[in-house]
Image: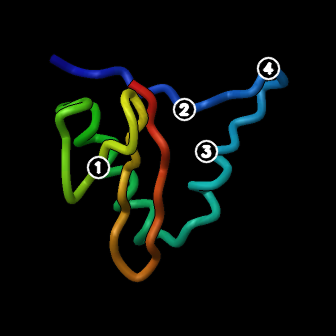
Amino acid sequence: MSWDILLFETQRGEKPVEEFIITKSPQTKAKIAHLINLLEIHGNILGMPHSKQLTKGLYELRVRGKEEVRIFILF
């Protein structure tokens, strides 16, 4: 099963998550892209160290390395 990943978009068409990712270093962007690919494959069972459940339905995508990044995910 493949999961569809949708990035948050405001009613005015702003895409804050996408804008945030664009500001990151090339290495961090590559890690984010890799984790999003893993998320498409595994969905809410991805698990540590790549993702962590915070509350019911709310997870964080965990980008580790020189630049630590967390991206919140709703299932």
Of labels 1 and 3, the one closer to you: 1
Give the structural element (helix, strand or loop) at label 1. strand
Give the crowd class for mark 2: few <14, some 14-19, many >=20 residues within 10 Å. few
Give the structural element (helix, strand or loop) at label 2. loop
Q: Label 4 sits on what residue type?
A: Gln
Residue at 39% x, 37% y: name it.
55
Q: Position of residue 38 (x, y in %)?
A: 23, 42
Q: Label 3 sits on what residue type?
A: Glu
Q: Which mark is residue 18?
A: 3
Q: Label 1 sits on what residue type?
A: Ser
Marks 1 and 2 sit apart, C-alpha to C-alpha, by: 16 Å
Marks 2 and 4 sit apart, C-alpha to C-alpha, by: 13 Å
State left or right for residue 12 relative to residue 60.
right
Give the crowd class for mark 4: few <14, some 14-19, many >=20 residues within 10 Å. few
- For label 2, the residue is 7
Marks 3 and 4 sit apart, C-alpha to C-alpha, by: 15 Å
- For label 4, the residue is 11
Marks 4 and 1 sit apart, C-alpha to C-alpha, by: 28 Å
Residue at 19% x, 41% y: name it.
46
Give the crowd class for mark 3: few <14, some 14-19, many >=20 residues within 10 Å. few
Q: Is residue 25 above or below residue 50?
A: below
Of labels 4 and 1, the one closer to you: 1
